[in-house]
Image: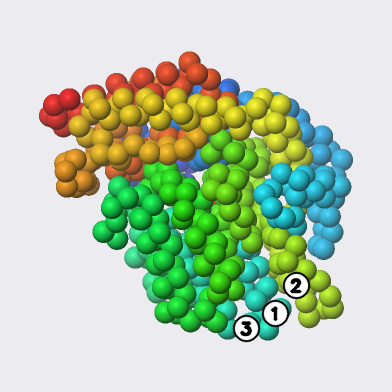
Amino acid sequence: MPIPAANDPQALRQAVLDHMHVGMTNQTLLAEEGGPLLMESAEGIYVTDVEGNKFIDGISGMYFRNAGHGREEIAKAIYDQLTSISMNVYSGATPKTIQLAAKLAEIAPGDLSRTFFCQGGSEANESSLKMAQAYHVRRGDKGRYKVISREGSYHGSTYGTMWLGGHPGFPRTDYQPKPANVVTVGQPHYYHDTYGASSAEENGERAALEIEKAILFEGPESVSAVIGEPVSQPLGGVVPPSNYWPMVREICDKYGVLLIFDEVITGFGRLGEWFGADFVGVTPDIMSFAKGITSGYFPVGGSISTQKIADSFAGGPDKVWSHMYTYSAHPGGAAAAFANLAIVERENLVENARVRGEQISESLDEMKAKHPIIGDTRGVGLIQGIEFVKDRETKEHFDASVGVNAMLTEELRTRGVWIRVPAYILPLAPPLTITADQTDELTGIIDEALGAVERRLGVEA
Ligand SMILES: Cc1ncc(COP(=O)(O)O)c(C=O)c1O
């Protein structure tokens, strides 16, 4: 088969079906849907496909395009960097990356001040987990290898990270057995409280105590770290009550367990604060980041640690932290990050995320009053979600065979919003550049699309 021309949508779609493994779907489903979205250009919050259809990008690509689309200054910064020095060498560093590490130490909470760079979120979490365990070993705690993570979270798709958490969209049936170091507990989620709690705070307290119980059950001397996102995305922007993370921090300190925040989505402004750690008022020992650091214009991730952790790797050859990736600390990524962070600062995008988040929350509340299929709306800043239910009383979800998510994806798409809706949650995470009018445009379309889905389901609004 010849290589398809870039301006021939039909040939491109056929070539996707013939030659690509497209993540999280397959050729049969893609063929039924008429092929994947073939993007040709993008500007601000909008993406345009090869046939000229324009969509609001409702989830910022994949929660990464914080500074919005079409940023020539980021592209130019990458070009300028690659035309001077375009690589890093084994155990080396380039000026741009060094400057970025210093910048991160400036904006990161607490004394998080030393960064290991990689290419994405899964690698960042892998690095954070390895860093935590190596830290314990340097201190003589060789038995601390277990990691406590929380159901409903997502921390990546490598073998080391995919078993952490329990994203409903990522069944693990193909990848047995579960690694022996992974311990799973619940997380605060008052809407689906399983602790018999009578308030969100009690739900948070019980969830924190479940971590303590797990540490004691496993034996504190065997536990390396607790990992969690300050605000969890997979279940649709579940915001923990304010007592939860401070309690978890205390529990970790009590048993010598490290706290790792996965800020792959929450970092760099999405919650209306620079980091989720700022939002929840707790500083972790290690923080994983990716996505928003470059708004996805260059693949960059990393793990930033406190000085205490960093110091354990100083000294002779036996202290060295043996960990690397070929493309770690790529200067092109550092240039992209600098240009991106300059935009975030200059355009006050962190504050905009906060204000637009409040606007979205209000609209979601109004929609909830109108649409019976909405069970719950939640979120903060520009990570929000709507959960659909068949029955508000029982909170039962529609059977997967009804395909509510596919219906909603279609109704949104025909009205000009691009969000591929997973099983029973509509995730909402537009670029941080979204204006008040564009926010109204987005929520207005969601409102209309929900009405259309309810009509198709025969549900009376
Ligand atoms: C919270 C969180 N952690 C980690 C990851 C994995 O990042 P990546 O896909 O860049 O490996 C993701 C990806 O969506 C994420 O949302």
Q: Which residue is mark 1?
A: 139
Q: Are marks 1 and 3 in contact (CB under 8 Å)?
A: no
In which image quadrant can residue 337 be found?
A: top right
What residue appears at the point 30 percent right and 26 percent down from the top-left corner? Answer: 367
Residue 209 horizontal/vertical position (percent): 41, 66
Q: Residue at x 66, y 68 (%)?
A: 131
* 454 is higher (above) or lower (below) than 202: above
Q: Nearer the viewer, mark 1 or mark 3?
A: 1
Identified by mark 1, the residue type is Arg
Looking at the image, which is closer to me, 15 or 348?
Answer: 348
| Disc 3 residue lies near ligand 1 with CB under 8 A | no
Type of residue at label 3? Lys
In the image, 421 versus 241, the foreground residue is 241
Element marked by disc 1:
loop
Residue where numbered disc 2 is placed: 312
**Quadrant, the C terminus:** top left
Q: Residue at x 65, y 27 (%)?
A: 348
